[in-house]
Amino acid sequence: MNIIPYRVTLLEPLLATRIAGDPNSGVSYPYVPGSLVRGAAVAAYMRERDIAALDAGADEVRRLFFDGRTRYLNAYPVDARGVRTLPTPRSLFHVKGEETSIYDFALETIYEVDDEKVQFVAAAKESQPFCWMEDNHIFFIAPERRINVHTQRDRVKGRATEESGAVFQYDALEEGQTFAGWVLVDEDADVELVSSLLQHIYRLGGSSNSGYGRVAVEVEAPQDVWRETPNRIAPIDDGETFVVTLLSDTAVRDPNTGQYTWNLQPALQQLLGVEIERVQTAAGEEEQRGVWRLEEVGGFNRAWGLPLSQAQVIASGSTFVFRARAAIPLEAIFSAEWRGIGERRSEGFGRLAFNWQSEARLTRVTPPESSPIAQPTPKLNGVAYDTAQRMAMRMLRRELDGKLRKAINELQISKRPPISNAQISRLRIIAREALPHGDLARLQKYVEENIKTRRSVRDQFDRTRLGSERLSRWLEERLSQPETVWNKLGAQNVSKRIGDNVQVSTQGNESLAREYTIRLIDGVLARLAKERRTEDGGSR
């Protein structure tokens, strides 16, 4: 028994489309389906093996992806504590107008409640599709969603036209949320490979070229002790009633007709190897009753490039009440929960739990307070590292350029600066020649040989003021101490980070300090020339 826990953090909105809404809309499931995770693992497997198509007949391929020996469970939302929540049982209800007390039809019929006032909790599927039960308390959570409106564009013209311009909308899961799931692996030899495939998943869902589907997957160490619900498994005695709750959509067929059915009893009886019967009101047994719902599911086969045929499934959260006609041992219950029931188990279908609900009356409480989710920062290497380094430097330069412009424009310069246009132009030419290589020595040489040694020129630089400071003194400090340019720009601690190991900063970057020192000098000289033109009546 091998369990691989994984967490999916959405870096972009996720569109895991289900059958819902009108034809011009795409509505996402409120969770990350196991079929998406399996499909992304298949793509990672093909990249690793450098193959264009899977050999569906190969034993390794069937074992990893198709025959149910490896099962990719749905990733459901985590609460503020990081605990994976579960689909809300459909047997839960509250009295209209009194939402604090929650009752469970599967455990007890509440006779004092008027049927007309009963409101099933799971009926409000969009507002409380997931829950967590502990002792006699329960809270509900729902993932955040984002609705975007898009316009179809003509592939050739790149814009909407009369023939190709339909308006449609996507109802997707909002970015920044974390979902948790498991992969159940029967074969010990496959654990390392499956873990590696999960770690190489970077995108999930549809419209990946339109700003959807980028994810970060965190794979935890494999476990060997596990149950999907928090309570412990207990054996079921002969004649005892028990509740089965479906923790995912479940597809089972009628053994006589071969059609999809809501009747879970034949498949469950075969799975347990023990005869069972369904508790139902038709037999006069009203103390317990199950609540279920049928839904349509589809899918898409990338190999064929075609949608899968729609199938009728029993919706997640459905509850059934059975009576055992013989004792059901712990091993049979554990095996049923481990393997799952019905079809498409490799995609996360057919998950079930025995006697998850234990309290007939629950108190609704407020969910734990959520905290901002820190998105995992990947460690980059190779081409990705080099690209990220260039991106971070561009981001840093863009911010520094803004600070440079602000510093130059805010300098106080007296009207009609005493320095001549000729001196400004000569020094600007030297500065521009020195800029490509950050050659401060050339500027210093020019200042020493042409400004300090010539009295008439030195007087012009001394009489020109930047605020209260002489231009000659200001130039000397900039050229002798280029690292102080960050103080002048207000950029002492500016840095940019991408990923876990790519960071650029102004601190300790001597070449960048020399470059921005020269650019600051050139910008100040340009400002002086502009002030002189303004006083001479020239164009600004």
Image (spheres, rainbow, N blue to C red):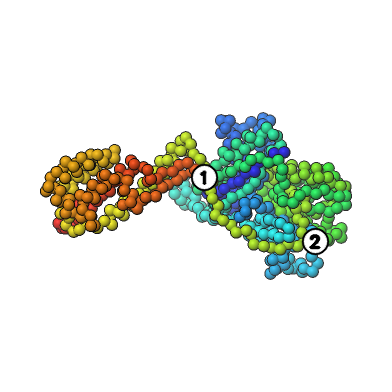
Residue at x 32%, y 44% (from the top left corner): 513
Residue type pointed to by label 1: Thr
Residue at x 60%, y 51% (from the top left corner): 28
Give residue 108's mark: 2
Q: Is residue 439 left or right of residue 491?
A: left
Residue closest to the eye, 44 or 166: 44
Q: The C terminus appears in which quarter of the rendering? A: bottom left
Q: Which residue is mark 1?
A: 377
How many discs mark residues in the rendered view?
Answer: 2
Residue 57 appears in view: no
Name the element at disc 1: loop
Residue 153 appears in view: yes
Residue type pointed to by label 2: Glu
Residue closest to the eye, 259 or 141: 141
Residue sitting at the far left: 456
Counting residues from the start of the chain, the first of labels 1 and 2 encountered is: 2
Residue 63: give x, y in percent of width and height: 69, 34
Mark 1 burial class by Cα count in 10 Å: few <14, some 14-19, many 20+? few
Residue closest to the eye, 528 or 71: 528
Name the element at disc 2: loop
Residue 201: give x, y in percent of width and height: 57, 40
Residue 539: give x, y in percent of width and height: 19, 55
Separation of marks 1 and 2 at Cα, in angstroms: 49 Å
In the rendered image of this protein, does residue 343 appear above or below residue 244?
above
Residue at x 67%, y 56% (from the top left corner): 131
Q: Nearer the viewer, mark 1 or mark 2?
A: 1
| Quarter of the rendering containing residue 432 | top left
In the rendered image of this protein, does residue 213 appear above or below residue 44?
below
